[in-house]
Amino acid sequence: MLSTFTRTLFAMPPVAYMDGHGLDGVFSGHQLDLHALHHKAYVNKLNKLAKQVNMQDASVEQVIFEAANPEANSSLAAFPQRKQLFNNAAQHFNHSFFWSCMTRNSRPMPPSLETRITEEFGSIDCFKREWETAAMQHFGSGWCWLVEHEGELKIVTTSNADTPVATLDMFPVLCQDLWEHAFYVDYENRKIEYFKKWWDSVDWDQVWSNVIEAQAKASCTVCV
Amino acid sequence: MVYEQAPLPYKSLEPHYDDRTLDVHYNKHHKAYIDKVNAALKEVGMEDKDLEYVLGHLDEVPEAKRQFIANNGGGAWNHSFFWKCMAPEGERGEMSPELRAAIERDFGDFKTFMTGFADAAATQFGSGWAWLVIDPATKKLLIMKTLNQATPINEGKFKPLLTIDVWEHAYYLLHMSNRPGWIKTFGHNLVNWNFVNAEFAKNQ
């Protein structure tokens, strides 16, 4: 009998600047190639684990949310590898989001985003310094995020694979990978150099687009 | 008293541990933990306390600085221990008969122990350490893994015998994403059994 369902595997999205030529002096081609290996490993494990709980057709956000909130899915609550499923799903999302926040030849911040950030943080410089401080002070592996939360833009850091999409009310608009594998080949222990250089690669148009989408999601009480 | 960064017991661990990582790991990562914990202990008036004591009695540290001291004190102590757990080729020795007997008693055999240790190291998600420890009260050997710079001595009872650093900075330049490769190299080519034997003997 032919299956009428399409089995969709999770996959790392195509990333235009992962062509071996590096990213605007922020990351070398070698650093990005290695980082892609990490992402692909998470995706491979996610595919294996998702099949075991029949979630291979779910969106990655759904897998993350239900793995993080067992009351949302009772059969998942009993899955002995629920934590591993969460980690790999979350890392797949986090990395995909990270790639999408960067671009070659990035353009200046759109005025609307500049206005919003200035309103929330005082100035673009204040925003960047606050971000760099949060990133420097974060201990261990994790991520730095700009999220839309309760009508405000906030900088938060998460540990390991933890991600705002595991919540119902935090919507990511920008993120930066703080795991050492993200920067060690190019920067070794010089984290502050990584944090300061990274701004050169941020796709501010995409960030503004993320803000619009986050505001729409935040105001929609039924579409989780 | 100031917690000192002891000199490395060797000049090089090549080819099994690259010189560049040894340099950055010891002179930058470890040194930063040492400087930060010393400054923090002075700030809270605990500079006269032994670091091991502080790490086993973190509830005595004022809450405002407790996590900072746990993180940086753990980093300082863990790395000091880690350097001693490795030795260059020809200086590593072999597991003593006494330790081997205890390993066989508590894990079945050496291979099962090494697999368990490697597994702990491979599955510590994010940054952290894997450990062989002894409970001095029961003499039982255990494998543990700790997150970030947590350490078995936080629990106040275990004595570490062996550790491997699985923070990515410990192995990334040579092994890149291949953490299992790092763990295998550590187990086969780096473990200083002379040191592990001595730590075991101290706790009998």
Image: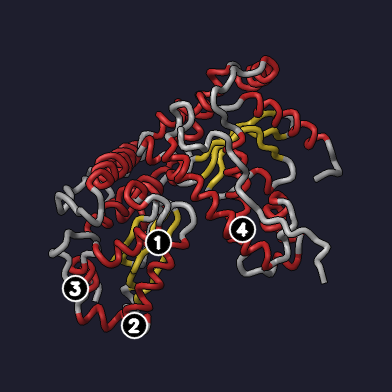
Residue B108: x %, y % from top left: 37, 84
Q: Earlier in the sequence, mark 3 or mark 2?
A: 3
Residue A186 marker = none
Looking at the rendered structure, the secondary structure element under dot 3 is loop
Residue at position x 25%, y 49% from top? Answer: B18
Residue type beneath disc 2: Asp
Q: Earlier in the sequence, mark 1 or mark 3?
A: 3
Residues under labels 2 and 1: Cα distance? Answer: 21 Å
Q: Which residue is mark 2?
A: B109
User: In the displayed structure, would residue B117 be above or below residue B82?
Assistant: below
Residues under labels 2 and 4: Cα distance? Answer: 34 Å
Q: Earlier in the sequence, mark 2 or mark 1?
A: 2
Q: Which residue is mark 3?
A: B94
Can marks 2 and 4 be said to lie on one chain?
no
Can marks 2 and 1 be said to lie on one chain?
yes
Q: Nearer the viewer, mark 2 or mark 1?
A: 1
Chain letter of disc 1 in the image: B
Residue type beneath disc 3: Glu
Q: Which residue is mark 4?
A: A46
Looking at the rendered structure, the secondary structure element under dot 4 is helix
